[in-house]
Structures are given as C-alpha cells and as structure tokens.
Image (spheres, rainbow, N blue to C red):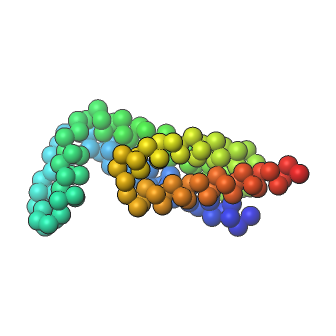
Amino acid sequence: MTALRAIAVFKLLKALCLLVVAAAAFDLVRSERLDAFADWVAHMPIQHGHRVVMRLVDAMLQLGPRKFAAIGAVACVFASLFLVEGWGLWRGKRWAEYLTVIATTSLIPFELWEIVHQFSLLKVCALMVNVAIVWYLIRLLQREKK
C-alpha cells in the first residue's frame, strides 16, 4: 500500500505541475501578457552564456495565442487524468490501478519517440519511472487476481 501512495503522490504532483503550465499558458494567450513576458526576459541576466534557455524563450515567444490556448487545454486534460489517477490510487481503488496502467502504458510510445528525436537524461528517467509504475501495478493486479 505504501508504493501505491507514492505513485499517487507522483501523479498528484504531475497534475499540479500541469495546472501551473495551464495557468501560465492561458495567461499568455493575451498578447499584452506575452509582450510583458518578452520584456521581462529581455532584462534578465540570462542572455549571455545561456544559449539553450534563450532558444527556448525565443521559440516560446514565436507561439501565438491559439497555441498557448491549446497548450493550456491539453495541460488541463492531462492534469485531470493525473488527478483522477492519483486520487483513486491514494484511496486504494482497483479501477485506478487499471486506469493508471492503461494511461501510462499508452504514453510510453510517445516518450520513446521523444527520446529518439531529442535525447535527454531527464526523458530517460521519466520513461524509467513510468515503466516501473506500470510493471509494479501489473504485478499487483496479477497477484490480487490469484
């Protein structure tokens, strides 16, 4: 039961992070907010020696209001899924175990694609955590069947 609670906390933390992303994306839908953000970034001392950060900020500033709205909507959908998974796992609900296995397994191909196209250790770690969660829950579900 302790492992289920840890997975639940992990899912709830992911939901919280996605809700922050959604709030920021919806806030940047208004062009005056995006302009204020661009001005704020322009005055930060990260411009020199932080090429990766500056490229990320430049790419973000190229997005239009519709893309920010889409990012916010997708983040809300995934946050809702993670909230339901986390709540159900915390309460020890069997349906939440099945939901988590299905949802997490369905996202693994996208994680693999991301790793192949833009490798990073963080992505590999996220994949490993998700595979471990699926493996643990499948074993738990099989054990409970017997």
Q: Is residue 104 visible?
A: yes
Residue 81 x/y as whole percent: 56, 43
What residue sits 25% from the left and 35% below the top?
A: 65
- Asked whether 60 or 106 is in front, the reply is 106
Q: Is residue 138 above or below residue 10?
A: above
Which quadrant is home to the N terminus? Answer: bottom right
What residue sits 40% from the left and 47% below the top?
A: 116
Residue 106 x/y as whole percent: 57, 40
- Asked whether 74 or 108 is in front, the reply is 108
Q: Is residue 51 left or right of residue 15?
A: left
Q: Is residue 80 above or below residue 16?
A: above
- Asked whether 48 or 5 is in front, the reply is 48
Q: Is residue 87 visible?
A: no
What residue sits 37% from the left and 54% below the top?
A: 119
Q: Is residue 134 left or right of residue 27?
A: right
Please identify the quarter of the rendering in which residue 3 is found: bottom right
What residue sits 59% from the left and 61% below the top?
A: 9
Residue at the right extreme of this rendering: 146
